[in-house]
Image (cartoon, rainbow, N blue to C red):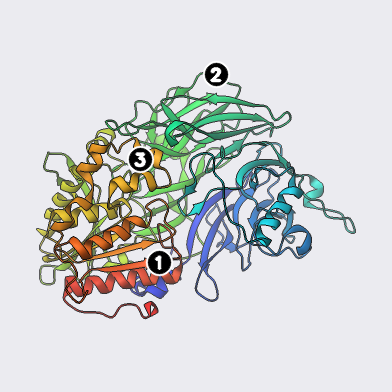
Amino acid sequence: MTSQTGSQLGDLDQYVALPRLSGLRLSPDGTRLVTAVATLDTKGTRYVTALWEVDPSGVRPARRLTRSGRGESSAAFTPDGDLLFTSARPDPDGDPGKDGSDDDVAALWLLPRDGAEARVVAHRHSGLGDVHVAADAGVLLVASDVLPTAQDAADDEKLRTERKDAKVAAILHDSYPVRYWDHDLGPQSPHWFVGRVTPGLVAPAAGVAEPRVELTDVTPGARAALVEQHGDVTPDGGTVITTWAVPGRAAEVRTQLVAIDVASGERRVLVADEGFDVLDPVVSPDGRWVAFNRETISTPQRAPRVDLAVVPVAGGPVRSLTADWDRWPSGAVWLPGSDGLLVVADDDGRAPVFHVDLASGAVRRVTSDDAAFSDLQVAPDGATAYALRSSYTAPPHAVRIDLARASATDAPVAAEPLPGPAPLPELPGRLEELRVTAADGTPLRAWLALPHTAGPDRPAPLLLWIHGGPLGTWNAWSWRWNPWLLVARGYAVVLPDPGLSTGYGQEFVQRGWGAWGAEPFTDLMAVTDAVVARADVDASRTAAMGGSFGGYMANWVAGHTDRFRAIVSHAGLWALDQFGPTTDAAYYWQREMTPQMTADNSPHASVGAITTPMLVIHGDKDYRVPVGEALRLWCQLLSSSALAADDDGRTPHRFLYFPDENHWVLSPRNATVWYGTVLAFLSEHVLGEPTPYPRLLG
C-alpha cells in the first residue's frame, strides 16, 4: 500500500477523517473478500460504514459495493455468493407506515452477485443484526430483539408503539445484569431467528411481488439468556449452536453451550461446566464439532485462564485442545477439512496466527509479522487465509497468508498486503521495542514511539501510556488510544505491558492478580526508569496517562509518586468498594475483589498524597466504569488532595465531562475535543507552555 503525508497524524481533524477498516468476509468460492470501511459523514459528526470488496488475488483495486447515509454492516455471503448485509437505510419499495422503515432500525438486505440493485429481504420492527449463513443450505441465522410479553411480531410492534407514544422508557428487572457497557438492558431481549434464502428471493420474476425471508423465532422465552451471547449454525442449517447465559445466586451469571434443533425447537445443553464460562462457538465444516473458548471461573487467589476446546454437535465429552499451551487463543476459524483451526493469541507484544491440530492439539505459529491479526478467513482449498493485520506501525488492513507454504516449510510466513480501500498513513516518528527487568527479576517489554527529531541534542518529553483491561496488551493499532498523535507534537510515548498483561504466560497474569497496586505499579515504574535513562528522552518533563484500568493505574500513580508533572485519568476506577457493585458486570469483579483486596488497592485512600495536577475525563454513558468514580475523584481532589482548591475555588486539576459519551468517547468531534484537551493540559504542565483549550468547549 502507498502512504500519505504524516500531517494526518499531526492534525486532529485530518486524523478523525481517516478511513477505518473492520471485519472481513470471504465468499464461498474464495473469489470475493468484503470489508467494512467507516468514514465521516458530510457534517463530520459521525462515522458511516460502507462495504468494500477487496480482490483476494491482490490484482484489482478495492471497489465500493454499498452507499447510504445510514451505512451498512453485518456482511455475510449466501452459499451461491450473493451478499447479505444489514442497514437502516430507507427501503425504496417499503411502506414506512407498515414496516417501520422510517425508524432507525436495520433491515436485512441482499445484494445479488450479478450486480443487480440491493433490496430488503427481511425486516422486523426491532431491527436485525449478527447474520450467519449455513454453508450448505442457505439457512439464515439472525438476531433480533423481542419484548417479553409479545405474543407475535404484530403484538411486539404494537407494544413498542404504545411505549413510544406514551413516552415510557421504564424497565422492570427480575434478574442480573441490567446494563452492558453503554446501554440499558430490557425490556426487550435478543432472540435467534432462522429463515431461508431461496432462488426466487435472489431473482424474483417481473410483475410478481418480491418475496421476503420468513423468519422464525427458535428461542422463544429466551428472556435475558442471549444478552451479549454468540451463535453459529451447522452447515446443513438444521441446528443452531449458541452460548446461553444462566443467572445464579448473588447476581452471578454463567454461560452454557446449547444446541437448538431448528425443526422442533428442542434445546439441549452441550456444555455446562461449573468451572468454566463458554465463549464464541464455531461449527466445523463437516458439521460434527463445535469449537469454543473456555474461561475458568476466577477466584480471589487465581486469575482466569482461557483455552480452546471442542465438543461433538451430537453431544459428548468436551476435549481441550490447548490445555498445555501457555497462551489465550481467540478468533477461532476452522480449516476446510475440519482437521484443525486457526486462532490468534496475544504473544510477546504481538498477536500472531497459530494453527491448532484437532487430533493432537499441537500448536504451530503461522505468521512471522510483528503485528496483530484478526477476522481470519480461510479459502475453500485451505491453502490461503485472509485477515486484518495491524500494529503500531499501521492501522488494520487486509492481508493474504500463505498457509500452504507455512505448512510445507514448518515455519512462520509473512503476510502479504492486498490493495485496500484506503492508503496507510505515514508515521511522524519511529517505533522501538524495549526489554526491561522488573524489580523481582521478571522480564518486561514495551513499545516506545519517538519523534524523528528525538536525540541527545533534542530529548523528547515522555508520556507513560498505561493500557486498560486489566487483562490486555499493547499490540495493535488503536484509533481511540493512538500514541502517534502525541508523537506528532514532539512527545515520546512508552506503551508498557506490566503484570496482568496478556501474551506472556499465565504466571505473568497471576503476578498482578488481586494486587493491582503492587507489581503492575512497580513494573510501570521500572519501564519508566529505563526510558528516562535514555539520552533521547527528557527525564525532567514526564507525564502519565491511562484509560479504564489504565485510568485506575493513573489514579494509583498519582497517589504513590510525585515523579510526573501531569497525570491524565480517563474512565478510571477510583474507589474499588464503590466500583465493584455498580459496574455493569459486578459478578465478574467480585470474583477478585475481596474486602481486603479493595482496601489494599483502592486509589482513593491515597488522595491526600496527590501533589500532581490531574486531568479527569469521563463519559456519563459509561456503565463499565460508572461516572460516579469520576465524580467522587473530582470532589476529593478538590477537597482532600495536596493540590486542593484554594479559597477562591481555583485548582490546577481539570475535569472533562462528556454527557453523551460512553467508556471510549467515540463521536469524531468529541474525540478531537478529548485529544485537544489532553494536549493543552500536557502542554501547560509538562512543557510549561500554556495552550488554549479546544474552542468547541465554549
Q: Nearer the viewer, residue 170 or 370?
A: 170
Query: Answer yes or no: do the residues labelled 1 and 2 have beta carbons within 8 Å?
Result: no
Q: In this view, does 410 lie above or below 550?
A: above
Percent x, y of residue 646: 17, 73
Amino acid bearing label 1: Phe
Q: What residue type is labelled 3?
A: Trp
From the viewer's side, name the closer residue of 542 and 372: 542
Under circle 2, the secondary element is loop
Q: Which residue is drawn at 22% across and 44% down?
A: 601
Mark on residue 589? 3
Q: Distance between the residues labelled 2 and 3?
A: 32 Å
- Report which residue position mark 1 lands on: 658
- Cα distance in 3D space between marks 1 and 2: 50 Å
Q: Nearer the viewer, mark 2 or mark 3?
A: 3
- Report crowding for label 3: few under 14, some 14 to 19, many 20 or more residues within 10 A (C-alpha): some
| Element carrying mark 3 | helix
Is 622 on the left or on the right of 268, as rendered? Answer: left
In the displayed structure image, the side of residue 128 where residue 697 appears, left or right = left
Asked whether the beta carbons under mark 2 and mark 3 sit within 8 Å of each other, the answer is no
Instruction: Looking at the image, tell me whether mark 2 or mark 3 is earlier in sequence order.
Output: 2
